[in-house]
Image (spheres, grey):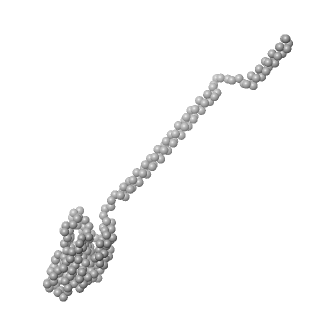
Amino acid sequence: MERVDDTDSCIRYNPENAWFLGGVPNEYNGTTHRSRSSSAEMFFQFNGTSITVYGTITYHLEFPSSVDEFILDDSPPKWFAPTLDGVAHQHQVMFSSAPLEDGYHTLVMKRMVDNSESWIDYIDFTSSVVGENNPPLSLPLSPLPSSTSSLSSYWTTSSLPSLTANLPQSNNNSGAQLESLSTGMLIAIVVVCMTLLITILILVFLFLRRWHAPVESDILKPSGVSFPDPLLTSQSLIQSLKQMSLLNHFNP
């Protein structure tokens, strides 16, 4: 069980000028926070499974009886409306929750009766089972809304984002980085393979070209075979014909 004194910075009082510090030795740490304004609110966030708020019932009979509204998360409100008997009563339970789901929770107290007195002494809460002596949630908090009607929207738009901002994030970013890395590696492998294949094809083409060139030359002009000159052959034939004509002329 963790105890938070009324002077702890984890407890927020709104507006600040509506709350005053007081206390007697019988109260926890000898301090309490008092308010007489109906617009005053107390705000507390914690990480745990239960919470109880303790305060002091005033002895001032000249003031009307106070009514304090407590709202935990989105649960229905509960009211603390003590009966005054002219005697101060310390360490009185103003609000106590049922067992809660382990996690972050938000408690808001709003004073309902103007000119009445409410005294906040301390808060006990069962901390999260994650670790021992788990301190209450201490985050930069936005100003509280001025009315309980806006509490629901306040928790969804202000408190919850501030809580989730400090929670461990999922591995979506890591998965995206791994996917991007795998795609880049695949593209690099494909480019290298295509370059290697093109290089091999070029080398094969050059080799075949050099190998076929001598073969074609040998086919067109075989070695060791000579062909007669067509011009010389024609002249020899004409000369032979002339000789035969002369022989026929002299030998009828």
- State how many labels appear: 0
Relative to residue 157, is residue 200 drawn left or right? right
- Dividing the image into 4 quarters, which one contains the N terminus? bottom left
Residue 186 percent coordinates (x, y): 43, 48
Relative to residue 115, is residue 180 drawn left or right? right
Residue 24 percent coordinates (x, y): 18, 81
- Residue 17, compared with residue 245, is above or below; it is below
- Residue 134, compared with residue 252, is above or below; it is below
Is residue 140 visible from the viewing direction of this image? no
Residue depicted at x 26% and y 78%? 41
Q: Residue furthest bottom?
A: 62
Residue 31 percent coordinates (x, y): 20, 79
Residue 10 sits in which quadrant?
bottom left
Relative to residue 197, is residue 210 drawn left or right? right
Residue depicted at x 17% and y 87%? 61
- Dividing the image into 4 quarters, which one contains the C terminus? top right
Relative to residue 244, is residue 117 drawn left or right? left
- Residue 62, compared with residue 161, is above or below; it is below
Residue depicted at x 81% and y 18%? 242
Residue depicted at x 47% and y 47%? 191
- Residue 192, compared with residue 90, is above or below; it is above
> Depth check: 76 or 27 in front?
76
Residue 60 percent coordinates (x, y): 17, 86
Residue 159 sits in which quadrant?
bottom left
Is residue 186 visible from the viewing direction of this image? yes
